[in-house]
Structure formats: C-alpha cells, structure tokens
C-alpha cells in the first residue's frame, strides 16, 4: 500500500535551502510514499507564537491546518516546526472547540521527517555512501518535544562509509532560539561560540542536525571562525544528496 | 481586612481529602537499600565523600568511654568532652575525661546519642529534650555519635516521631561543608569538621 | 527587591564582557550539573519521582487555604506565633517590630531567598539593627555589599581571588594561606562569636509541615542551626506556597531538592523546628515567630501561574540554562535569576520593567527537563511574552516587522512572489555562498555569517519541476 503524505516544507527551507525539501521528497519516495506539496502552506506561525503575538499565530495556524488536514500524514523536515504543529497548535484553540478538534487531528498526523521514515515506514537508506566523519547536534525542540534522538542516528547508520564523532554537549542548545538570536545577538553569539568550539573539537568533517535554523546558526559561526567543518541537514545525507554543496557553499 | 483574611479569602476551596494526600505517598520512589544488610548499607553511605564520617563499633555501652578515648587520642585531641545529661551516658565511667555540660565556643568535641540511623542516606536522627541539647552538636570540631545498630532503618520515612513534636527534630548527614567558593568542597564551614559514629552492637 | 539600574541588554553585555564572571559561573554551575546527572542516574525512577513531587505540590496549591490554616493551628499549639503579610512592606514591618519588641541589637540571618525577595536586609539596616549573614556565600555578599547572583550559591559570580581579597580587607584575623579551606576557616573564626551573640535568629523555610506546624530548614554548613538555636527569638519568613501536608510528603520533596540542587542524597543538616524551646530544654529560643508571606502568590494562583508555585528553589533550571551560564545571575536584575527568575520577576517587580527576561530565552526546554517538580518554564515564559505583546510593551519595530511578515504569510500567492523576489535580491549580497553583512539582520552578521539562499525558493523550483 502506498502511503500518501503531504510535505510541509517550512518557511526557512523554502527560502534558504530548498535542497532539504527535495531530499525529504526523495527519501519519502524511496520509502514508498507518494508525496504532495500542499499549495496553501507558508509558515506554521512559530515566530508569532514565540513572540507572544497570539492573533497572528492563530491566523497562521488556521491557514496551515486548513492546508494540511486533507492528508492522512504530514511530514516536516524540522523538529521545531513539527513540534509547533504537534504540541502547540491545540493550545492556541483552548476556547475554540471546533478549531481545537481540527488542530488535534492535524497534530496527530504530523511527523518529523526522520521519525516518520524510521518509525512509521521502518525504512533504511540503501546504497548510499558518504566517506566522512560526522558529528550530530540534537536540536532542542525535536529532542524535547518530539523525542527525536535515536531515529536520525539509526537512519544515518545505514549510510555506508559514514563514521561518527560524538559531540560534547550534543543536547545543549546552540543559541539560535528563533527570534532570540535577533533580539539578543551577543548572548546568542556567546552560546554558539562554545558550540562551534565543541564541534571543531570533534575533528569531524561534517556537522549534521535536523533543523535548518540551528544549522544556519552553527554553520555561520563555524565559517566566521574559519572552521573547515561542513554542515548539512541529516536528511540530505540520508537521501543520498550528501555529495552536493554544504550550507554556505556555492552550488 | 487583616492580611490573614485577605490571603485566606483568595484561597477558599474544598478542604483537602486526606485520602488524596495519602495516595500521593503510596510506594514512593527512593534509593534502593538491602533490608537484610542495614548496617553495611548505612556504613557505605557514611563513607561517601559528601558524608565523610568515620566509624567504630562497640559491643556494650560500657565500652563507650574507651571508644571515645581511642578516637580523641587518634585525633590528637585532649580527653575533653561536652556530654549531654542523658542517663545512658551518665551511667558510663568517664574517669580520665574532662566533661562539660555546656559547650564553649571553641569546644573540641561533643558526644550525642542518635535515635535512628538511616541507611538510604547515612543520616543520623536526633531530637532536642532536657537530656539532649542541640547546640554542642553543631558547635564543636568533632561530633561523636553513639548509634545502636538495631536503630538503623532503611529509609527516611522511619525518621519522624509520631505524635507530639519536640522543639527540634534534625537529621545530620555528614560533616559541615560548603561549596560556596567556586563550587569547591571544603569541610567544616561552621559546624563540625569531623563526624565519628560509634556503633553499638549489643542485642 | 529589584536592581533595574540599566536595561537588561546593557546588564547582559556587561556580564558577557567579564571573563572572570564566566569562569566563576562555569566552575560552580558546571560542577552542579555534573553531580546532579550522577545522582539522578543512580536514583530509581527519577521521572516517576518528579511526577509525584509535582502532584504533591499541585495537591497543596489546590487546597492551599485549608493547609495554611492547619499549619497555623498546629504551629500555635506548639507555642509559635503566626503572622500573615500580604506585601513585602508588611512582612518587613512585622519582622522589625518583633526585633524591636525583643530589644534586639543584632540578628543572625540564615540564607533565605524570601528574605531577599521582601528586602529584609535593607529593612533591618533602616531600622538600625545589626545583621550578620551566616551562610558563607551570603557573608561574602554582605562584605562586598552586593546581591546574590544564584539562589543556592549566592556568591557564584566571585572567584577565589576576589573572595580572598575581600576577607583580607574585612576580617579581623584573616587567612594567611591562599586556599579555599583557609578562607572558609577565616569566615568560621569571624562569624562564630557574632552568631552566638545575636539576639534574634532569622531564617526562611524550605518546607512548612501542615500536620505538625513544623518549619524545615536545610543547609550544608550548619549555619542555620548555629543562627537559630542560641538567640532568644527565632523569626521565620516563608512564602505561603512552602506547605506540604505531612512529614512523609516533605521527605519526598527533600529527596528531590538535594539531588536537583547539588547532587547529594540530602543536605548535611535538615532540621524541623516546632515552636520555641520546651520546659527543661537546654537550648533553643524563648519565642518563635512565623511570618507567612503572600507577595503576589495568591495572584499567581489565580492568574495562570499556579504551576510556578510548585518551585522548591533548587536552582537546577539556572544551572542548566545556556543563557544563565553566559550572563550569570545579576544581569537578570530581580531577586531570582535564571528561568525561574524570569517567570517570577514580572510578578514581583512588574512586567513593564522586566518583560525582556521572558524574551531572553531560547525556549530550548532544558530547564523544564531538569525541574524536579516539572514546571513548564518555557510555557510560562511564553505566557509573559503574550501578555507583554497584548499590553503593547514590545518594541514597535518588532510589532511592525512581525505584523507585515504575518500579513504576507497569510496570502500564499503574494508570499510566493515576495519570497521569490527576496531570494533573488539576496544573491547580490554575497560573492561566495556566504553573506558577511546583511541589512536588517546586523545582529546575526555581526557575529556569524549567513548562508546565501538558493536563487529560487523551494516552492518555485518544485512548481517548475512538476510542469516539466
């Protein structure tokens, strides 16, 4: 039976690194899914939600729910956006039973990409080779809201030639925090500075993670300090697109 | 309106259901203790770095003065002791000791009897009474504690007294310590720098 | 007592520029984090224990009025006097009046964050009553005339070198040897006579036991007992949320508190005081007064912050907070720093003055993960953000920017067009794959590079590919 899934691309992937969206489609298709990209999607509304702008958060949540509810499964290449839909949408409709029910229905069908491939599809990449040493950062929302920890590691284990260098403080926040890094750039910088040092200390060639926001933060800091570590979303490697340009490299 | 009325008027609600409060205590999560080896379990906790207590053992309370003398001699301290007016201690033969019933600010050692020892944490349990002042146990450099092995219990739930409470009920779990300067552990911040437990094994 | 002398950003910048602060915070918080991890690992089912601890506190908060009355009746029956205070001023006035009635010239204080919250050190000074802080860290803070920077380690921001210089300047017979042990010994010498000579001992309470009327203090130094046994009068100031139904409930909370704070199984000294000294007792105070303080707690319970009343002041949230670890406690400006402080400070000092604290958080969730009573700290912080937004306290640039973005994001066709234009425009900003300086995002590119977006958005590329 073919699984029909909707891809929620996320605004950051749409805008900054479309490769992640295409990698997600490729992996999902390899896992036997039929992928559609719903037209009505833009952003899940997390920036408004986390800034306290409830009205806009509600408006964008409604738009997103309406765009995604026709599908039996929604897959998101970001732990933090998937977390918003899964864990926080229904909180927005505390006093609106009809929308709360719709929010809960979509929440129950929404999955982070690697959790979906690993846990729902029981799929593993086959014939994918990357000859490199990688280190992995656990992005906070995925880790603590959705329990994304073992799934990416299981998938990446099937990538031939890929070795692992454990990252000290792999579960420590990188200092991105959405609007936090814009509001408090100096504090954010101090945090990501330590993260970049820890990444460099692993001696890894590649930095992998499951959230583009965190990756841009860490890769941007690594590049500024002259590090040679290259950063990818884990799904790019899993989908066999690890031979392409890393974050910040010209295509 | 008094502050009391103002506060309580905002906290009106159903009286707590005793059964509900009790239900919160069923099968509490707590450190594992081998109930058949309470003395060994207790001594293992007593030796932990955060507790840092030494110990000795005697077979009868008549041997207590000799054990205290042994400890003080080994520490290079004079045989001088703040002794609470507990009849069990007064009945011992303290010849050769200088005894004080009140601890001076620079008193070197005090002796006390613990009502219980708690294996899960290596704690000693005390209460105040006319026979048991509290201050000496915090003031002196050496705190020497007599604990009957049969009074060792597995868990802290055995520590409280049932019924009327004394002025103070207290648990001592190791020597006075501080980590207030750079998180670095130092013994003897204000209270005893040494805690010595003498186990009484008589049946 | 707040210390909003500069903006949060200025205070944070000053903290970031202080390399000594970073070293000091890292030494203590780092050790605490490591020790907690070992203790939690060794404890059978710490997660279930956290559930139980949260349930105990929730039960108490739901029946707070009844438990307070039960506590009061039992404390009075044991001979204590019980006072109630709605505000910080009321609480201080009660304490000062008791001190004056007792003819007190000096008080010995055992560290209490509630005492800091109500501004007791200041009130005592104004009343001309001498105060000796007996906790080693509070002693350091008193000598330096500073404020605590952490709820468990108030002098966390100080290095050993700074403490050494302070003691040498202020102690009568200071240490000779430059070791932490010698410094602690110097404080022991200095404080002992002052403690034993105090007229009144003042403490907080870690727990109030409803069914016995006892108050519980925990210390590692033994300073609480040395401060509270010799004086004629013992005054307790405690928040009304400190109640637990009975001793077995307190025991569960104590197991959680010590492990979460320092990684120990218990603090060295855990004492339950029930009333003043009894007939025939050799020591203990003639009188015991307990001041139950509201200061916004009933309001927290009514206005969506009931979960915060679970807090047992262990400090784990701040020890594990990436922001606290960078800026230390003083930058927060309130009595309580770190995640729990960012939730509490708007209650005590007003949202207008402290709204930035809620924003200065990455919402990474680590604080909630280590909280022994499962307080959803990120959710509560988001609640403050929402209130701040609703009340128009957020800067206009932020409101305007987010408003425009959301307006566009609600129109998918316009959004596709706008994002398409934006990514093409951004191609101009970097010669390589990196942008080193980005208009409107200077905060980002001041410290790190921004990857240049692909020339086409995902949606546009995807549509083209589908058409092929």
Image (spheres, helix red, strand yellow):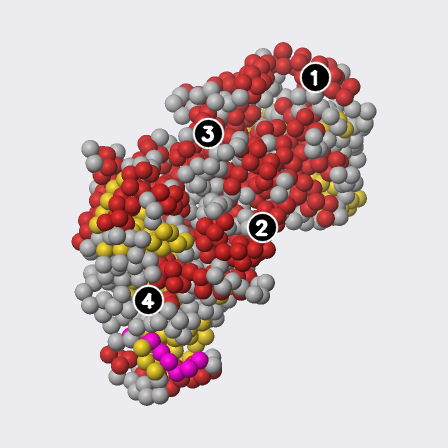
Which of the 4 image quadrants contains residue C200?
A: bottom left
Is A171 placed left or right of B52 in the picture? right
Q: Which residue is disc 3 drawn over?
A: C353
The crowd level at tag 3 (other Cα within 10 Å; few <14, some 14-19, many 20+) is some
User: Is A208 above or below relative to C356?
Assistant: below
- Front: mark 1 or 3: 3
Q: Give the magenta part as a residue range.
A: B77-84
Task: Tell me where residue C36 appears, x and y as whole percent.
Answer: 51, 54
Residue at mark 1 to residue at mark 4: CA–CA distance: 74 Å
Task: Tell me where residue B161 appears, x and y as whole percent.
Answer: 26, 63
- The residue closer to the viewer here, A91 or A157, is A91
User: Is A17 above or below relative to C154?
Assistant: above
Helix, strand or loop at mark 2: helix
The chain holding disc 3 is: C
Whether discs 1 and 3 lie on one chain: the answer is: yes
The residue drawn where x is 36% and y is 51% is C130
């Amino acid at each position: 039976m073919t699984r029909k899934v909707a891809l929620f691309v996320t605004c950051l992937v749409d805008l900054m690194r479309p490769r992640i969206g295409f990698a997600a489609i490729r992996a999902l298709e390899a896992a036997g899914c039929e992928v559609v990209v719903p037209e009505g999607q833009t952003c899940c509304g997390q920036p408004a939600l986390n800034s306290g702008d409830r009205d806009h958060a509600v408006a964008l949540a409604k738009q997103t729910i309406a765009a995604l509810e026709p599908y039996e499964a929604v897959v998101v290449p970001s732990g933090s956006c998937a977390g918003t839909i899964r864990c926080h949408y229904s909180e927005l409709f505390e006093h609106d039973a009809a929308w709360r029910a719709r929010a809960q229905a979509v929440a129950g069908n929404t999955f982070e990409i690697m959790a979906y491939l690993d846990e729902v599809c029981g799929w593993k990449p086959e014939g994918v080779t990357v000859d490199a040493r990688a280190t992995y950062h656990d992005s906070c929302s995925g880790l603590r809201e959705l329990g994304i920890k073992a799934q990416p590691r299981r998938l990446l284990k099937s990538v031939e030639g890929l070795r692992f260098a454990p990252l000290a403080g792999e579960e420590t926040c990188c200092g991105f925090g959405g609007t936090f890094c814009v509001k408090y750039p100096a504090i954010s910088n101090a945090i990501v500075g330590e993260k970049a040092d820890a990444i460099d200390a692993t001696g890894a060639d590649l930095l992998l993670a499951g959230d583009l926001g965190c990756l841009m933060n860490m890769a941007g800091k690594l590049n500024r300090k002259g590090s040679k570590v290259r950063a990818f979303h884990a799904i790019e490697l899993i989908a066999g697109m690890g031979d392409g340009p890393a974050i910040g490299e010209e295509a | 309106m008094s502050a009391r009325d103002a506060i309580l008027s905002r906290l009106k609600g159903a009286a707590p259901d005793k059964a509900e409060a009790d239900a919160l205590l069923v099968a509490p999560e707590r450190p594992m203790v081998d109930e058949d080896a309470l003395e060994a379990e207790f001594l293992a906790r007593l030796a932990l770095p955060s507790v840092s207590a030494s110990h000795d053992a005697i077979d009868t309370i008549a041997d207590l003065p000799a054990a205290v003398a042994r400890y003080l001699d080994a520490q290079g301290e004079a045989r001088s002791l703040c002794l609470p007016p507990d009849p069990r201690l007064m009945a011992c033969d303290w010849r050769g000791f200088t005894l004080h019933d009140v601890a001076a600010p620079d008193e070197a050692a005090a002796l006390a009897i613990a009502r219980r020892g708690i294996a899960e944490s290596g704690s000693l349990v005390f209460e105040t009474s006319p026979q048991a002042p509290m201050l000496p146990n915090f003031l002196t450099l050496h705190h020497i504690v007599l604990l009957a092995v049969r009074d060792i219990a597995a868990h802290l739930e055995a520590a409280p007294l049932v019924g009327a409470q004394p002025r103070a009920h207290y648990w001592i779990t190791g020597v006075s310590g501080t980590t207030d300067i750079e998180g670095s552990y130092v013994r003897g911040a204000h209270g005893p720098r040494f805690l010595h437990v003498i186990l009484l094994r008589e049946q | 007592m707040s210390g909003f002398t500069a903006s949060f950003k200025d205070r944070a910048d000053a903290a970031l520029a202080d390399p000594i602060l970073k070293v000091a915070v890292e030494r203590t918080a780092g050790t605490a984090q490591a020790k907690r991890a070992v203790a939690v690992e060794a404890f059978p089912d710490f997660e279930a224990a956290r559930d139980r601890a949260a349930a105990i506190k929730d039960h108490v908060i739901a029946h707070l009025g009844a438990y307070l009355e039960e506590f009061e009746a039992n404390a009075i029956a044991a001979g204590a006097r019980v006072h109630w205070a709605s505000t910080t001023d009321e609480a201080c006035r009660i304490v000062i009046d008791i001190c004056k009635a007792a003819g007190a010239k000096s008080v010995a204080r055992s560290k209490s964050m509630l005492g800091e919250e109500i501004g007791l050190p200041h009130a005592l000074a104004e009343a001309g009553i001498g105060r000796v802080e007996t906790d080693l860290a509070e002693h350091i803070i008193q000598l330096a005339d500073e404020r605590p920077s952490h709820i468990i380690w108030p002098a966390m921001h100080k290095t050993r070198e700074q403490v050494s210089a302070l003691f040498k300047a202020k102690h009568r017979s200071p240490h000779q040897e430059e070791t932490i042990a010698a410094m602690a010994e110097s404080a022991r010498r200095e404080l002992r006579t002052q403690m034993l000579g105090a007229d009144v001992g003042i403490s907080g309470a870690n727990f109030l036991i409803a069914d016995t009327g006892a108050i519980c203090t925990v210390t590692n130094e033994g300073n609480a007992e040395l401060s509270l046994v010799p004086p004629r009068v013992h005054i307790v100031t405690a928040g009304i949320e400190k109640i637990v139904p009975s001793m077995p409930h307190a025991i569960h909370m104590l197991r959680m508190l010590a492990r979460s704070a320092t990684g120990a199984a218990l603090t060295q000294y855990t004492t339950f005081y029930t009333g003043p000294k009894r007939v025939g007792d050799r020591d203990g105070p003639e009188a015991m007064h307990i001041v139950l303080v509201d200061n916004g707690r009933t309001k927290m319970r009514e206005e969506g912050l009931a979960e915060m009343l679970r807090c047992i002041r262990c400090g784990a949230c701040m020890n594990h907070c990436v922001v606290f670890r960078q800026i230390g406690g003083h930058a927060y400006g309130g009595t309580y720093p770190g995640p729990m402080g960012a939730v509490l400070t708007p209650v005590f000092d007003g949202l207008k003055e402290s709204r930035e604290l809620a924003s200065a958080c990455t919402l990474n969730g680590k604080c909630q993960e280590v909280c022994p009573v499962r307080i959803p700290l990120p959710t509560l912080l988001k609640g403050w953000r929402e209130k701040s937004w609703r009340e128009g306290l957020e800067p206009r640039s932020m409101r305007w920017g987010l408003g425009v973005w959301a307006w566009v994001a609600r129109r998918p066709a316009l959004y596709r067009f706008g994002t398409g234009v934006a990514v093409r425009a951004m191609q101009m900003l970097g010669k390589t794959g990196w942008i080193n300086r980005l208009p409107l995002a200077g905060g980002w590119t001041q410290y790190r590079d921004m990857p240049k977006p692909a020339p086409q958005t995902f949606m546009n590329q995807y549509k083209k590919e589908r058409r092929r």
